[in-house]
Image (cartoon, rainbow, N blue to C red):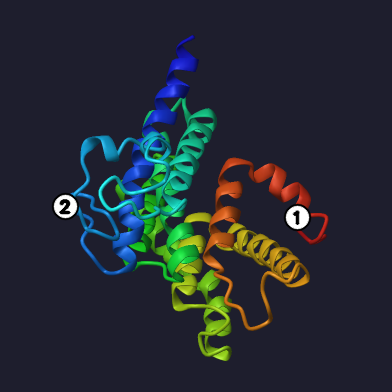
């Protein structure tokens, strides 16, 4: 019974955090401050408490602004639901160590912001990249439970790992002149190496390219995209990273079928 209540707590917490992440996603994409009250995107009317209940407000208002009647983006409830699911999964996998769980949920929250800012606006804000970098280090240092000296050693070795994983993305960025990949993807690749290390970072990157390739082919065949269409790469990196944190053994098992030398 206690575990069920805890599960629901993290679902509700996820919905609430998801509501805040909606603000972060939209404001950071335009370089705005995340502070201040929420308002309608169209009439700029300040929203009241009844307008901000996660998912429920969207349903009760039939997906429209209470004040101007304009249709609201489906992204708002979607992000709240995704965050709730991610928080619940985080609890299921890491719920017995609450500090580690807090750090993991912070990392997952940054993943969600990166996923949707890149998907909606084709940008990955530096602020969330730095947030991810900070909590990646806290996560790694907490796992080692070592002295401060080793913490500095771990930090610099993680920087080196980040550089090596970001290097192929930087190469692609320059040879495509930023059309194949954005520089935000290069920075995210650095975060991959910092968090996972060189070998695992490259595996996550490999999985991201694999997922991206499969989806791109599907979109081309279905006629939903053409060869000139821009497809953000950040969401694929996020999905790969998320899977690698939750079920690394499963991911490694299937990747070994493609890379026999692992």
Name above or below for residue 123 compared with residue 26.
below
Q: Nearer the viewer, residue 80 or 111?
A: 80
- Residue 195: percent from left, percent from top: 48, 56
Q: Residues within 10 Å of mark 1 (few under 14, many from 20)?
A: some
Return the mark for residue 255. 1
- Residue 211: percent from left, percent from top: 68, 61
Q: Nearer the viewer, residue 180 or 203?
A: 180
Name above or below for residue 110 compared with residue 211.
above
Q: Is residue 258 left or right of residue 33?
A: right
- Where is residue 77, by image quadrant? top left
Q: Mark 2 or mark 1, which is nearer the start of the sequence?
A: 2
| Secondary structure at numbered mark 1 | helix
Check whether the beta carbons of the residues at disc 1 and disc 2 lie within 8 A of each other. Answer: no
| Secondary structure at numbered mark 2 | loop
Q: Is residue 117 left or right of residue 209?
A: left
Asked if one can make out residue 69 in the rendered structure from this viewpoint, the answer is: yes
Name above or below for residue 36 compared with residue 85.
below
- Residue 119: percent from left, percent from top: 50, 64
Mark 1 to mark 2 CA distance (whole Å):
45 Å
Residue with the mark numbered 2 = 36
User: Which quarter of the figure is the C terminus placed in?
Assistant: bottom right
Q: Nearer the viewer, residue 87 or 162?
A: 87
Q: Which residue is at 41% across, 52% downward?
A: 136
- Residue 179: percent from left, percent from top: 54, 85
Q: Which residue is at 69% across, 43% downward?
A: 249
Q: Which residue is at 53% across, 55% downward?
A: 196
Nearer to us: label 1 or label 2: 2
Q: Is residue 64 left or right of residue 181?
A: left
């Amino acid at each position: 019974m206690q575990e069920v209540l805890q599960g629901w707590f993290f679902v509700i917490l996820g919905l609430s955090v998801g509501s805040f992440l909606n603000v972060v996603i939209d404001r950071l994409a335009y370089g705005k401050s995340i502070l201040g009250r929420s308002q309608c995107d169209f009439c700029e009317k300040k929203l009241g408490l009844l307008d901000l209940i996660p998912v429920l407000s969207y349903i009760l208002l039939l997906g429209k602004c209470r004040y101007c009647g304009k249709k609201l983006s489906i992204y708002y409830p979607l992000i709240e639901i995704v965050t709730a699911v991610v928080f619940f999964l985080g609890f299921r996998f890491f719920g017995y160590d609450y500090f580690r769980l807090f750090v993991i949920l912070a990392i997952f929250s940054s993943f969600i912001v990166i996923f949707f800012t890149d998907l909606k606006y084709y940008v990955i804000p530096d602020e969330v990249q730095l947030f991810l970098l900070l909590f990646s280090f806290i996560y790694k240092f907490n796992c080692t439970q070592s002295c401060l000296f080793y913490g500095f050693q771990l930090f610099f070795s993680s920087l080196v790992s980040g550089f090596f994983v970001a290097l192929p993305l930087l190469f692609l960025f320059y040879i495509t002149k930023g059309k194949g990949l954005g520089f935000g993807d290069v920075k995210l690749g650095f975060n991959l190496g910092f968090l996972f290390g060189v070998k695992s970072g490259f595996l996550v990157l490999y999985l991201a390219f694999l997922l991206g390739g499969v989806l791109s082919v599907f979109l081309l065949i279905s006629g939903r995209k053409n060869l000139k269409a821009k497809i953000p790469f950040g969401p694929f990196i996020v999905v790969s990273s998320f899977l690698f944190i939750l079920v690394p053994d499963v991911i490694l098992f299937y990747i070994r079928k493609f890379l026999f030398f692992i």
